Image (cartoon, coloured by chain):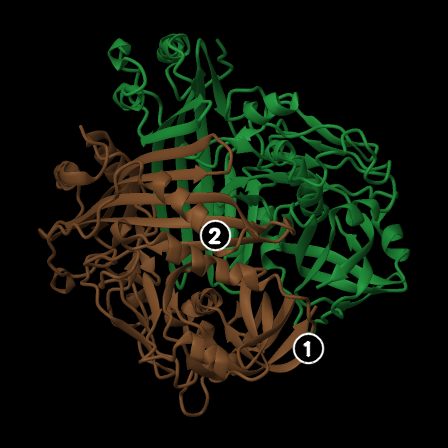
Amino acid sequence: MAWAPGAQAIERLRRAAVATRDLVVHTDATRWEVFAKASTTRELIFEPTPPVQVSVVHETGVAVRTVCRGEAGFGAASGIDSDAARVAVGAAQASRTLMPFDPLPPSRLLGTTDTTVSRTLPPSGWAAHAAEKLTHGIVEAADRRLLVRRIVFHEGEYGRLLATGEGFVATHQDATISVLVEMAHRDRQDMTCYEWIWVPDPNIFDADRIARQMCDRALLMRNSITTRSGLFDVLFHPEISAHLLGALAPAFLPCSEDKDPIPKLVDRNGQLAAQALTLVDDASMSDCPSNAPCDGEGLPLRRHLLLENGVPRHRLTSRLEAQLFDEPTRGGARRLSYRDYPRAGISALRVVPDPGIPAAELLRGAGRSLYALRLMAPVSMNLLKDEFRLLTSGVWLDKGVVEGFQPVVELRGALSHLLHRIDAVGADLGWHQTPAGFVAAPTTFVRCLKVVGR
Amino acid sequence: MKNEGKENVFDGYWLDELATWCQHGKEEDTGFEDLYLERRLELRLHSGHGIRRLEECRTEGAAARWRTPGRLEIEAATGISPRTIARLFQDRFDARDLRLQRPLPSPELDVPRGWREEAETLIDLCSPTEMTIHLLLRRAVVVRPENWHEIRAPLLVRIETGLQEGTTLLTTWNHPPLQELAPLIMTRASHRSWHPQSDNAVPVLFSKGTTGVLVHELVGHLLEGDLLASGASPLAQLNSQAVSTSNLHVIDDPTRFDLPGAFSCDDEGVPAQAVTLLEDGAVRGALCDRFSAAVLDREPGRGRRASWNAPPVPRLSNLVVPPGSTPPEDLEADIRNGLCVTRISGASVDPGAARLVIRVEQGWEIRHGRRRRPLSPCEITGTVDGVLSAIDGSIGNDPLPDRHLGWCMKGGFPLPTGSEAPSILVHTMEVL
């Protein structure tokens, strides 16, 4: 029997759903939902000297939500055999608690989907070949000034199924590949840089181009140290922009009125941010690392417009949160894994550049400014207190010419000022992993921020 | 064979048979290391916005490890059935030999009766907007050629409140009883707080319950076998050398079952034993898994797995700093112009740069030995050797477990760890 999701995966998940159904229908549950998932992930770690470290994980699991006479329960169990179904149904029944409303979406809101195989994994051996080319590319592009310490390839393939007691079934299969490279400067080995990229298609993996891209940022750190403080224009590297927007994501989730940060952050015109910023959450498109036809509860996925030219528009909600906070059910529920209850969260947050300015033009056009390159600590943001704090490293630019490297710089102040001073966004949209989820962000130009050099 | 358990959640006879069968892997020179079987139970009680919701999650998984000169491999799969295990071995050696009987049905993992009532009482006491209480129970077995070891770990309680300005606590069940955690959850930061001037080098008093984090980063991580073996740790070449005050002793003790990092055996089947890391301020021990122990010629016993699907790596368990004889008030009274840290929200150490950063969540400005103004959240930093050598010889007499930071991240994998330490004064650290 195949381990990997592959061709038989959906059929196995269907059998798990049927086994679960057969058990649930013999309980007193009036409504129910079963979510089953099978995944295989392969992680390969290449270092300059052997051994290669390989980790292969085959994971399957079932989660069940039941509703019965004002009570609701959630249970999850590993496996997709009949034992797993029995344990998950038993856990869902045992965890029933009073619920003033039905947390499952009504069937009229659910979409209909068929299995889609968007992407598949490359054959084994591809990662070793790609790692070799990437190492060579980085050493060449950096003119031997950088060392590659480690390359980690992460390849994942998964299939999932969602079925309800009303006969709705949605299935989906996909695969994703990413690469993490750890580099160090040959003459300053304490200066370590990490670069993460998502590989949309292994068949067109251009190792030389990716190597050049990875070296660019690392090599900027080699400039002589310059320390400045004061009010400066700041350009955020796409990775920092992504982390900033990821930290802002809770503003687009449902919450009680007293915990809602948006009224505290918008100006008198209702602008949360400058007009240059438009944000959407859209996992329905194939150009993102985790696309899907429906959200974690079966609602059709669509383009959620969160911020339109700086004005907040919609929030992402799960059915439970929508009812708790009196919001419309839009289909923004995310399951972190089969073990987790579906909750509102970003799936694929992206900036809409419309059309965006080429990053090189942004860098050249800026006067004396800080180009913030790398986060030195997680973004600290308090939405309710309207505060943010960033510790980054960066380079000082003047009309695109590098004046010096600043190892640690602190950016701190009112979050609303930061958001309202976004002057332009670049066209160099790239996907980045953030604690909130995947975010596609470009280089961002922000006017007049307080910069404290260290 | 080793079987210390009283309430086995694995069938001992079946494990005996499995261990004998694993001997094939050794005989056939396949590089077989061990087989790890794990069962977990997680219960979550959410409370918020007028509703309470319970979730129950049960997982099982198995992982086999192989080591050849060119390749370290771990293959893991959901489930612990003979069929799952046979599949893990199928391409390595002849799994047809695995004619094991099915194990006896094992009892379900369970948590103490009445836990929910106690959890709900805590929620009622704190009445937060949002709160989640997790109960986490893990039982595991490591099967090696011809022997197996059952791993027991304490029942963990993790409490999270709110998204912004929330609190996270990690403790073991009944240490202390849940209701006694209420004051820790309800403590709020002062609004009239003061941010210390950046780049200032000041003395910092780590009060009881926060010192553990400092020592965790400063000593614990930097004496982990993988960092020592690769030479990346700044303490790598300092064995037996004094790095701090002679009054400082640091022990990593997994046998302390009142702290979250406890275990009966590590995840490579080595029985738990305390390791002295610093003795009289000098580096003595190291935290090694089997691989780094072989490289460094040390004892293994700290190979820990974040989950059944993660490989074991050298990690800390519970760091304990024995108390000194100085009352904490005396330490505070000696500070002319400095900081007192009462709660830490995060900390990290960069072995390459030999620098640690501590994110202070709560604390006080100290002027002439008195607490003057509450601190606003800030970061303090210092070099590893600088901070170690700046630790004052007077160690507090007030050891206390740190319950705010128990979940340690390394390489993206979280693990429960514990600490108990008294107040410690560091003569100089920089404010970031």
Q: Is residue A12 visible?
A: no
Q: Secondary structure at mark 2?
A: helix
Q: Colour of chain A?
A: brown
Q: Are marks 1 and 2 in contact (CB under 8 Å)?
A: no
Check the image and report above or below for A23 versus A359.
above
Along the viewing direction, whichever of B110 and B400 lies nearer the viewer:
B400
- Residue furthest left as drawn: A167
Which chain is mark 1 on?
A
Chain of the residue where label 2 is placed in the rendered structure: A
Left or right of residue A448: residue A158: left
Q: Residue furthest bottom?
A: A269
**Tag on residue A140?**
2
- Few, some or many residues within 10 Å of mark 2 (<14, 14–19, 20+): some
Q: Amino acid at mark 1?
A: Ser
Q: Position of residue B284 (x, y in %)?
A: 75, 28
Residue B353 image label? none
Give the x, y percent position of residue B303. Answer: 54, 28
Q: Is residue B16 above or below residue B257?
A: above
Residue at 39% over, 19% down: B10
**Residue where numbered disc 1 is placed:** A229
